[in-house]
């Protein structure tokens, strides 16, 4: 049921992403960088729930598309900072208002109280699945 709910929810937003040629993962990265500025790949993987092996390939494709830029961290060439390019920022600015409007539409359709209960249940589920170090099992 959780997978069905996730897919039903994502179906509401995918047309906006597809207009810009983005996948779900790419949008999560664009949104994270738009909201946070520069992040390291590890940080992006954590906040966007994308595994380390997958984030490497996704970032490479996004760089080829001209959406992101990767620069070495001064003083530590092993680390990289990822940021949006001007094109990536344009796409974020084009999609973000549509996503926010869709959230408002869903809230109006389902009701504020139902949305609050859904968030509470999901927060409780996530808290219950975390182990002693705050990480979900299998996310180390």
Image (spheres, rainbow, N blue to C red):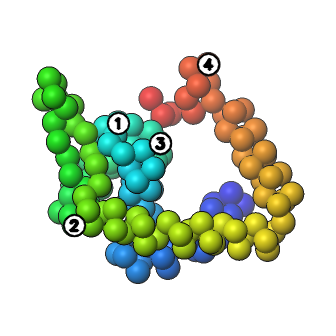
Disc 4 target residue: 132
Residue found at x 26% / y 62%: 86
Compared to residue 31, the image places residue 77 above or below, namely above
Q: Is residue 93 visible?
A: yes
The first of marks 3 and 1 along the sequence is 1
The first of marks 2 and 3 along the sequence is 3
Disc 1 target residue: 42
Q: Give the x, y percent position of residue 93.
A: 42, 67
Compared to residue 4, the image places residue 53 above or below, namely above
Q: Give the x, y percent position of residue 25.
A: 41, 58
The first of marks 1 and 4 along the sequence is 1
Q: Residue 47 — which label?
A: 3
Compared to residue 24, the image places residue 44 above or below, namely above
The first of marks 2 and 1 along the sequence is 1
* Left or right: residue 76 compared with residue 10: left
Q: CA distance from mark 2 to mark 1?
A: 21 Å
């Amino acid at each position: 049921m959780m997978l069905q709910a996730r897919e039903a929810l994502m179906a509401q937003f995918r047309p906006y992403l597809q207009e810009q040629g983005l996948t779900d993962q790419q949008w999560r990265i664009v949104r994270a960088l738009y909201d946070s500025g520069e992040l390291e790949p590890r940080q992006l993987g954590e906040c966007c729930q994308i595994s380390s092996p997958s984030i490497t390939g996704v970032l490479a494709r996004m760089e080829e598309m001209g959406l992101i830029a990767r620069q070495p961290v001064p003083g530590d060439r092993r680390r990289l900072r990822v940021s949006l390019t001007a094109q990536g920022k344009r796409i974020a600015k084009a999609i973000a208002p549509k996503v926010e409007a869709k959230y408002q539409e869903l809230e109006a359709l389902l009701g504020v109280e139902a949305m609050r209960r859904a968030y509470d249940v999901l927060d409780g589920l996530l808290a219950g699945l975390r182990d002693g170090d705050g990480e979900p099992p299998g996310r180390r």
